[in-house]
Image: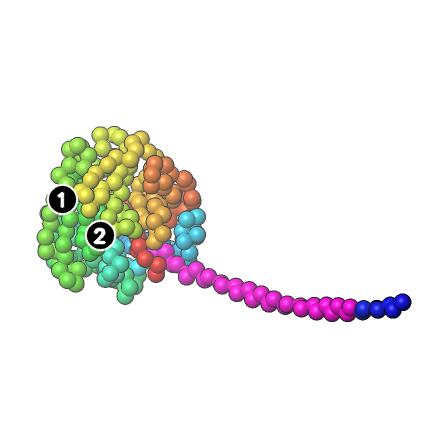
Amino acid sequence: TTTTTTTTTTTTTTTTTTTTTTTTTTTTTTPACTVVAFGGLSAGSQNIIKATATSLADAASGTFTFSRVGNFPGYTSTYPNYPNAIAYNDNNKLLYGYIANKLYYINVSTSSPSTTATQVGNNLAKGTAAATIVNNLYYYVATGSDELHVVTFSANGKSIVSDTVVVAHLASSQVMSFGDIAVDVDQNTIYLAFTAAGVSYFSTFVIGTSTYSVISTGVTGLNQIFFTPDGTLLSANTVTGELYIVNKTTGASTLLTTNNSWKWNDATSSLTCA
């Protein structure tokens, strides 16, 4: 008998794979945004005050510091609520204001507290107490009416070339009083806060379509309105000095601060981060 033995050898090979994961962290830095607004003081003053917030968050909470940047001439007891119709042009840094039936300008990038504004060449077709700048054009509501005018300036912004009525009746021929207008950062939508026939209105005028719409009536807390560069609408109350944040969709306002420095005849702002 023959016995055959077979031996089988099995070899196992183990392969180890090492995976290296690289994690990249990207840090996004939000650029600083200095928010600047301007106002003409009430209670017998022709001074122009600059309000500065060091961030959009500070502006949204009403945290501003104040300084004087110049004055508009012509204040008398005959014009106790002026300068008014204040509007700022980001393109040439000129701040416009209306007082004693004359329109003036001051370059706030070079002015000092003692700087006196210069009268614009020619004059407005009508008086005004509410204005805003849109793409170098000066829009204003004519005193004692509901007419919306647009003014074109010379290339340097220091002389009036034309003054045209763009909307004959914003409020059904009612006299618009004690209010303000301000253009949103889209440079197309003008917001209006005013009183007519004893009723307070919050409304818009869309320049591109020449469409006027009333958002709400009977609103409170709306007076001297202006925008921050992120499209936040603020309102300064001339009588109380309170500052509000305004809901653009409803006109509802929320109190931010009772700082009496906000007792302004009118207000305007830069729409870019300074």
Q: Residue at x 24, y 36 (%)?
A: 213
Q: Residue at x 15, y 33 (%)?
A: 173
Query: At which x and y percent is residue 226?
Result: 31, 48
Q: Residue at x 70, y 69 (%)?
A: 13
Q: From this view, report whether residue 176 is shown above or below residue 228.
A: above
What secondary structure is found at the residue carrying circle 1? Answer: strand
Q: Residue at x 10, y 52 (%)?
A: 162
Specify the quadrant that holds the C terminus.
Answer: bottom left
State the residue in front, 23 or 15: 15
Is tag 1's residue or tag 2's residue first in the polypeptide sequence? 2
Residue 134 is tagged as 2
Residue marked by disc 1: 166
Specify the quadrant that holds the N terminus.
Answer: bottom right
State the residue in front, 88 or 177: 88
In magenta, the rendered stretch is 8-36
Q: Amino acid at mark 1?
A: Val
Magenta residue check for 85: no
Magenta residue check for 30: yes
State the residue in front, 149 or 48: 149
What is the C-alpha distance between the residues marked 1 and 2?
14 Å
Query: At which x and y percent is residue 96?
Result: 22, 54
Residue 217 is tagged as none
Q: Mark 2, residues whose alpha carbon is within 10 Å: few (<14), some, or many (≥20)?
A: many
Q: Amino acid at mark 2?
A: Val
Outermost residue, right direction? 1
What secondary structure is found at the residue carrying circle 2? Answer: strand
